Image (cartoon, rainbow, N blue to C red):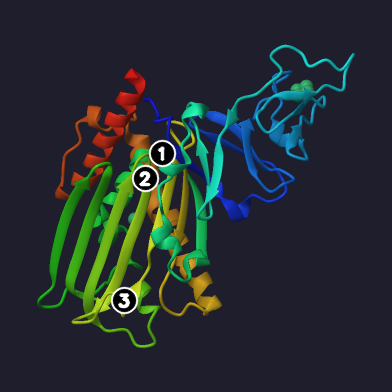
Amino acid sequence: MKFLRNTWYCAGWSQDLLDKPLAITLLNEPVVIYRGEDGTAIALEDRCPHRFAPLSKGKVQGNNIACGYHGLVFDAKGNGTYNPHGNGAIPKGCSVKYYPVIEAQGVIWIWMGEASQADPASIIDIGECDKREGWTSVHGYLNVKCHYELVADNLLDLSHVPYLHSFLSSDEEPPAGFKEERKVEVEGNTVWSMHWNYNCPVSPLFSLLWDEAPAIGTLRAHMCWQPPSVLYLDTGFSAENGTIEDGACFPGIHLITPENEHTSHYFYAVARNKKLDDAGLNEGIRIQINNAFEFEDEPMVEACHERMPETDLIALKPVYLPGDVAGMRARRKLQELIQAETSA
Ligand code: FES
Ligand SMILES: [Fe+2]
């Protein structure tokens, strides 16, 4: 199974790239990311061409990186620039692959394809989340042992919530007048999976944002997918007849990057619009959200992946349910883009 290459992937949160080189495998390629002296994030192949030592075990020198094994030095474009041995000449082929990197919206975006085609304007704008106060409050990362499209499917089909996440749903019987509405919309490369629950009891998560939460209201959970695997969740709970703005909102982004065909990097961030100064609540929300992913979603999608004899879901002829529509549209879009890239 091929990956889309000429696109921007999340390689990490900017706040986590400090003074040490980070080693990360992306699309099955070992990558070292480090911050140069001038503060820019630099990404190179994490394999020295001499004896294949990981450059991530080396030292940053200015905007260069020195191999920790025999001291060859590479610049920010991956060219060998210093050889401490013999007459000091740079041996033929003494270079490593370089990956364009842009830091925007708190994300380290990396271009895994043809460097000359890297277009900063094509970075997906997750600014809608960024502009909301409190956005930076909760960030997380999980390494998930399954194909990355299973993680996206899981996010696009929120019909699993009442079965898997007690904290995000209510235990109580739906009250009289409870109504669900589902809609999928596709526009260009964007797939929206929209859910509304009307006359719905407030869940424990949303009630955290109020001193006195309305017992019944409207829950919305609209997940937006864009290729390769960038998802934005607009979710909130508002009182009956109340506005969305007056309600409790937990907008979130979910950035999924293939580590290889069988494991995925899952970066997520969740904001809120109420109780912004409550630091204790930050930690409470972080733990609850992380627990939902780590102890509920992750074990389930990993177990599904284990049961799949191959990573191509469609080839396994799965049974379809209404909640699968958005995930299937996203999968189809991605395949179209991969095919177009392959034939080009
Ligand atoms: S392995 Fe890098 S200099 Fe020898
Ligand atoms: Fe989930």
Q: Amino acid at mark 3?
A: Glu
Image quadrant containing the N terminus: top left
Q: Nearer the viewer, mark 2 or mark 1?
A: 2
Left or right of 3, for residue 70: right
Whether the residues at callouts 3 and 1 have beta carbons within 8 Å, the answer is no
> 212 and 246: which one is in front?
246
The amino acid type found where label 1 is placed reads Cys
Tell me what residue is drawn at x 43 percent, y 30 percent. 5
Viewer-nearest residue: 295 or 1? 1
Residue designated by label 2: 151
Q: Amino acid at mark 2?
A: Val
Quick check: which quadrant has ligand 1? top right
Other residues around mark 3 within 10 Å, as few (<14) / some (14–19) / many (≥20): few
| Mark-to-mark CA distance, 3 and 2 | 29 Å
How far apart are labels 3 and 1 at the CA level? 37 Å
In front: 161, or 118?
118
Residue position for label 3: 245
* SS of the residue under disc 1: loop
Residue 146, numbered circle:
1
Q: Residues within 10 Å of mark 2 (few under 14, many from 20)?
A: many
Question: Residue 205's spot in the image, x, y percent?
Answer: 37, 72
Vertical arrangement, residue 214 with respect to residue 140, above or below: below
Q: Residue furthest top?
A: 92
Query: Which tag, 3 or 2, sits closer to the chain's start?
Result: 2
Seen at 14% across and 62% down, the residue is 181
> What residue is shown at x 32% (from left), y 18% (from top)?
343
Local crowd at mark 1 within 10 Å, few (<14), some, or many (≥20)? many
Q: Are marks 2 and 1 in contact (CB under 8 Å)?
A: yes
Is 128 placed left or right of 315 in the picture?
right
Whether residue 151 sits left or right of residue 279 in the image: it is: left
Query: Looking at the image, can residue 225 be seen?
Result: yes
